[in-house]
């Protein structure tokens, strides 16, 4: 049995607890939170699980093999580093840390100690996104663009901007789906609440090829939208996470070009653009809860030594983009080059 402690029993912590209780090879030993009233409810529902307000008490338990961290972003680095130094495997909410340097240090520490470091990029474990990865690799042809909209009214955050709160999901999905990594990012954003972080932002990501990505996130929209378009030379995907069924639709649509600039010289107008319209299909999707799959994978990686789908390096790549996007917003949309994945400061 893999002994596990959960730190943070606010918004996401109860979901972690509910899933961990159901994993046969895991034993939830502790839940830690600073707010006593939260722990009281925990005690009545799961009497066999120990509760504490002292994180160090949890770390001192030799039967705790791993720690799941569901606390505010600003605390991720400190809590994760303490757990790693105590010899515990770590599963941490997104984003992995509040800056790239701290994310790098966590990756280095975990790799040096041979510990599993997983980041809660929940969406990449959904049946919809896993199916899209299969389609991107086999059915779309040359990729043209990735375009996502993630907007709603609230919830305004005080400690992070809408980029770090919402765009992190789309960046994690992109990191999982796309066969190449972005090399630069430009972003614009604005805050409409004095003294608070940006509540609306637009990110554009550039890749080595002619692939381009755009992400729109907003806390100040009258409707909730969770929609992504991925276009390729052969087919296109529309992913609507709010659809109760048929979340992923594949369109056999696109363009065909007759002639070429080389044939017609500079007279590119002579090229003819044709439009291909075929069928729409909606594949059957795995309906397993994403967090269930994700936590089972985390426990399995501890047992086998395999690398999680969203490991520390995936978390680091996403944080580097978030940090560069924030820098770009502060410079009114300047293009910021991204650090190579191979570089560790």
Image (cartoon, grey):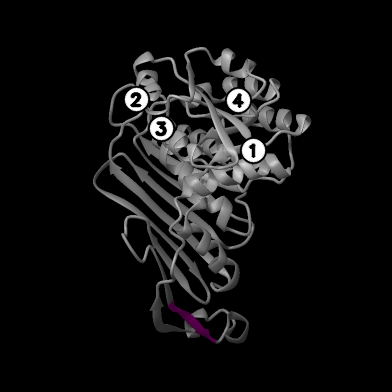
Relative to 50, is 204 above or below? below
Q: Is residue 232 visible?
A: yes
Q: Which residue is mark 3?
A: 14
Locate the N terminus and report the quarter of the image it occupies.
top right
Query: Residue 312 has which mark?
Result: 1
- Mark 2 or mark 4: name the one nearer the start of the chain: 4
- Residue 113 vertical placement versus 251 (above, below): above
Whether 279 is drawn above or below 231: the answer is below
Nearest to the observer: residue 301 or residue 188:
301
User: Is residue 256 in the magenta section?
Assistant: yes
Where residue 218 sits: x, y (%)? Answer: 33, 42
Q: Which quadrant: the C terminus? A: top right
Left or right relative to 221: residue 132: right
Closer to the eye: label 4 or 3: 3
Which label's residue is closer to the chain start, 4 or 3?
3
Whether pointer 3 and pointer 2 mark residues with C-beta atoms closer than 8 Å, the reply is no
Which residue occupies 35% across, 29% down? 157
Structural distance between the alpha carbons of marks 2 and 1: 29 Å
Query: Which residues, given as a range, are shown in magenta?
Result: 252-258
Q: Is residue 186 left or right of residue 155?
A: right
Real-space CA distance between mark 1 and mark 3, rounded to the nearest whole angstrom: 23 Å
302 magenta-colored: no
Residue topped by disc 4 = 80
Q: Residue at x 43, y 69 (%)?
A: 284
Question: Residue 201 location in percent, x, y?
Answer: 39, 41
Q: Are the residues flagged by discs 2 and 1 in contact, CB closer than 8 Å?
A: no
Label disc, if present, on residue 196 of the rendered structure: 2
Neighbourhood count class around disc 3 (C-alpha, 10 Å): few under 14, some 14–19, many 20 upward: some
In front here: 34 or 159?
A: 34
Magenta segment's dominant SS is strand
């Amino acid at each position: 049995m893999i002994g596990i402690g959960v730190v943070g029993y606010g918004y996401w912590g109860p979901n972690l607890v509910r899933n961990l209780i159901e994993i046969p090879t895991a034993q939830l030993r502790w839940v830690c939170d600073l707010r006593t009233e939260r722990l009281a409810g925990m005690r009545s529902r799961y009497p066999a699980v120990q509760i504490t307000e002292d994180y160090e008490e949890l770390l001192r338990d030799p039967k705790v093999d791993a720690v799941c961290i569901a606390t505010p972003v600003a605390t991720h680095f400190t809590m994760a580093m303490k757990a790693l130094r105590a010899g515990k495997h770590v599963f941490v909410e997104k984003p992995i840390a509040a800056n790239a340097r701290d994310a790098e240090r966590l990756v280095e520490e975990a790799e040096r100690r041979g510990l599993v470091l997983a980041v809660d990029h929940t969406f990449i474990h959904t049946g919809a996104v896993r199916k899209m990865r299969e389609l991107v690799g086999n059915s779309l042809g040359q990729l043209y663009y990735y375009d996502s909209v993630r907007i709603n009214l609230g919830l305004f955050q005080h400690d992070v901007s809408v980029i770090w709160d919402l765009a992190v999901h789309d960046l994690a999905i992109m990191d999982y789906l796309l066969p190449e990594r972005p090399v630069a990012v430009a972003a614009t954003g604005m805050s409409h609440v004095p003294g608070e972080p940006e509540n609306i932002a637009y990110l554009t990501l550039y890749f080595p090829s002619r692939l381009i990505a755009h992400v729109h996130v907003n806390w100040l929209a009258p409707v909730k939208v969770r929609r992504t378009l991925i276009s390729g030379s052969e087919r296109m995907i529309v992913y609507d996470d709010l659809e109760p069924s048929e979340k992923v639709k594949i369109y056999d649509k696109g363009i065909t070009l007759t002639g070429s600039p080389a044939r017609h010289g500079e007279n590119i107008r002579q090229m003819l653009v044709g439009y291909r319209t075929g069928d729409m299909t909606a594949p059957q999707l795995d309906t397993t809860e994403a967090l269930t799959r994700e936590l089972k994978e985390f426990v399995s990686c501890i047992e086998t030594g395999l690398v999680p789908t969203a490991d520390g390096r995936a978390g680091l790549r996403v944080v580097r983009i978030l940090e560069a996007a924030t820098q770009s917003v502060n410079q009114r949309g300047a293009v910021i080059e991204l650090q190579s994945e191979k570089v560790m400061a």
